[in-house]
Amino acid sequence: MFSHRRDRDVDLAIFLLRVGFGFSMLIFHGYGKLIGGPERWAKVGGSLQTFGIDFYPVFWGFMAAFAEFFCSAFIIMGIFFIPATFLLSVNMIVAVLFHLYLPEESPAAGWQGASHAIEYLFVYVVLMISGPGKYRINLG
């Protein structure tokens, strides 16, 4: 009796986490990058020069926009869940490292600057482990 309620509560909690974090990333981060077009994608992708990746900045910027917008939508719907949470986790690892490599005088530098990306990273890893739960769109 109590086990069934606990399962329902866990599924509801996962659903609320998916929707809350999904919409937050989609609206506040992904949307602006996606509609920014090639100029914005080149700027975002150009930040990978920090790690010695200086080729195809438009492609890498688009991939960040794709992950933050479309993968967030997939997480909200509970579809393509493992690939979506994986891509967003990788995106957040890059964001964390980017903040840690910024010059100290930058206001977004260091652990404090990376804290938001770290929080998202942990959420995506937990969601990758938990799966989408019961409340999701069923594709088949």
Image: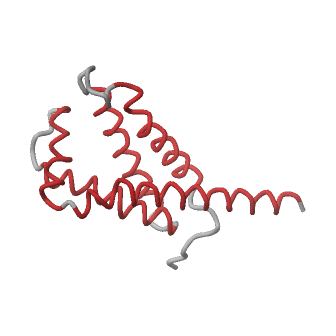
Residue 120 place in picture, x, y as percent: 46, 44
The N terminus lies in quadrant: bottom right
Relative to 32, is 115 on the left or the right? right
In the displayed orientation, state which residue is furthest to the right: 1
Residue at the image point whose x is 28% and y is 34% from the top: 98
Residue at the image point whose x is 79% and y is 57% from the top: 6
In the displayed orientation, state which residue is furthest to the bottom: 140
Relative vertical location of residue 83 with respect to residue 106 in this rendering, above or below? below
Relative vertical location of residue 28 with respect to residue 125 in this rendering, above or below? below
Residue at the image point whose x is 34% and y is 46% from the top: 91
Residue 40 place in picture, x, y as percent: 17, 54
Residue 44 place in picture, x, y as percent: 20, 47
Q: Quadrant of residue 138?
A: bottom right
Residue at the image point whose x is 41% and y is 46% from the top: 89
Relative to 40, is 133 on the left or the right? right
In the displayed orientation, state which residue is furthest to the top: 104
Relative to 16, is 36 on the left or the right? left
Q: Nearer the viewer, residue 52 or 99?
A: 99
Residue 21 place in picture, x, y as percent: 50, 54
